[in-house]
Every structure is written in structure tokens, then in C-alpha cells.
Amino acid sequence: MKMKIIITLILTIYGQVSDAESALKFNWGKSKAIVTETIIKNNTSIKFQYQISVKKKGSGYILNQKKIKAISYNDQSVSNTPLIKTIESLAIMPKLKVDKKGELIDVIDKEKYFEKFINSLPDPKAKSFYKNPKMQDILIMKAYEKWCYWVCMWTDVGLTANNPVVTTDDVEFMGMNLPQKTVLTHHGYTSEKSKNVKLTLESVTGINNPTEFVDNISKELNFIEIIENDDEDIVDVSKTVRIEAIVEAKTLKPMRVRVLTKSEVKSAKNSQSKSEVYVYDFDWK
């Protein structure tokens, strides 16, 4: 059979690691941050900004986003170019509800978010593509991922300096259980007088039956790429995620978060991989 490769392997990488009390505390208060987000993939660099804040509601908080602004494409200004709308569509996030510890609870007004996102897309084909409920589920998953890169990955995991937390577990994705090993490490304060600590995560997710996995996802999303002249079964599919976060320990306000993801698919004769880098720089007000 032809080797089918999903253009993006989107795997849930977050979850409860431990119920132990963590020294890291979520407490953003009324602060606001300007986030500069940089995405690097396929030899392309895209940069944009937006403002985020949390508002107290009941026993939790609502994450709000506004003031989206496209900055550059491959380090070139996009002011007064057609690229502005395309880049700004990448920045749009839904309203997220989180609890007092920073754990995700729900997405607020999903339909309004989907409508805003789809209307922002300049390409009619893209608009039609993202009306697919499966793709809308993935949009929500990606929003969850971003918040976890920033905050919820580091809560309730019992992290203390220089004592890595290692877990081996299965994660469910589209009806399949995928084995995953995760290592979270608290590296301590970044300097003697700093309020910020360095946290890292490395997660490797494998696939027990890679051919079945890729076929199932291909059917679910109808969004695949065919590798030329391949008539081989897939022998290995994996995704590695590496996160490095500099955060204020007493509030869990992120200062800088860098995420590297690498997806790899192998057959007996071929190996294909794709890497993506996401960098988030926070300017707190």
C-alpha cells in the first residue's frame, strides 16, 4: 500500500502527571501581557503579536485575547500587504476557561470563535476546509496545547528543582492508544537573584500500529500527502516535543517559551520528518 503521511501529526501531549502539590503557583492577577509569537516551519518564519489577560469568573478565570497584529513574514514587514489577514488569522484564539490552579476547564463560545476564525481566512478553500467539524476539534486542541505550553503543563506535577518527573503512559487519539514517555524537569532559578525558573519537557509518542494509525487519520481528516513511488508499509511513526519555558515561579507568568516538535515517519526504504518551532515572548504590563 502507498505510504500516507499526515501533513501534521497532532498529538495530545498534556495530562495529569501527579497529584502532588507543586511549588509553582498560578497567579496572574490583573496583569496583561503582549505576546510576540514566532512560528518557524517549512523554511518560513511568521511573527505576530496579541494581548492576553485573565479575568476572574466564579471559582476560575477566563483567558481573553485582543489587539492582534501581524508583524513580519520571513523577517520582512507585512504592513500594507495582503499577508496581514492571513498572518492575523493564525493568531486568533478562543476564550479559555481555567480553574484557580491554571488547569483547563472548557472553551467559551466555541461557535463565535469558529465563525471569527473562518471569516478571517482570505482563501475560500481554507474557509470550506475549516468548516469540517474534525478540523474544528483540532483548532480547539491546538488552543489547549498553547495554554499548556504556557501554564498547565507545569501545574500539579510535583516539580522541584533538579528532580525530574518521568511518566510512561498511553494517550488516546482518534480511538487509538498511543504509548508516550514524558520527562519534566525543574532546573531551578535562572540566576541567583532572579524570580524566574527554567522548566523543560521532553515527550516522545510512538505508534504501535503505524500503518493503521496513518490510514485511520487519513480517513478521518481527508487531508493527506502521498510520498512518490512508495508501495511499502510504514514501520515507525513518532512525534517528539521539546519545551523550554522561563516562568516566574510565584505566579507562573511565562517570560519566554520555546517549543520544538518533530514528526517522523519511516518505511523500510524511506524516512520523512518535519520540524516546527514555536516561540512565545511575553512583555508583562
Image (spheres, rainbow, N blue to C red):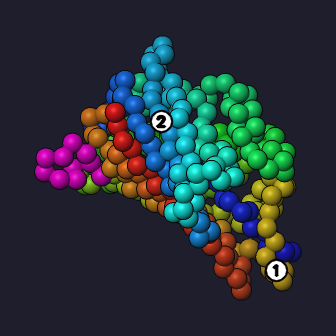
- Residue positioned most to the top: 58
Numbered disc 2: secondary structure = strand
Quadrant in the picture for residue 244: bottom left
Q: In this view, does 10 lie to the left or right of 255?
A: right
Residue placed under numbered mark 1 in the picture: 228
Q: Which of marks 2 and 1 is in front?
A: 2
Q: Is residue 75 left or right of residue 122?
A: left
First in sequence: mark 2 or mark 1?
Answer: 2
Q: Of residues 188 and 136, which is closer to you in this image? A: 136
- Residue positioned most to the left: 192
Residue type highlighted by circle 2: Gln
Q: How crowded is mark 1: few (under 14 residues within 10 Å), some or many (20 or more)?
A: few
Identified at 86% across, 75% down, the residue is: 1
Instruction: Give the residues in magenta.
Output: 189-198
Identified at 66% across, 59% down, the residue is: 9
- Residue 48 appears anywhere in the view: yes
Residue type highlighted by circle 1: Glu
- On residue 256, the disc is none
Q: Of residues 184 and 129, which is closer to you in this image? A: 129
- Residue 167 appears anywhere in the view: no
Question: Residue 216, how many percent across, how many down?
Answer: 80, 57
Q: Of residues 110 and 187, which is closer to you in this image? A: 110
Identified at 34% across, 33% down, the residue is: 285
Q: Is residue 194 left or right of residue 59?
A: left
Residue placed under numbered mark 2 in the picture: 51
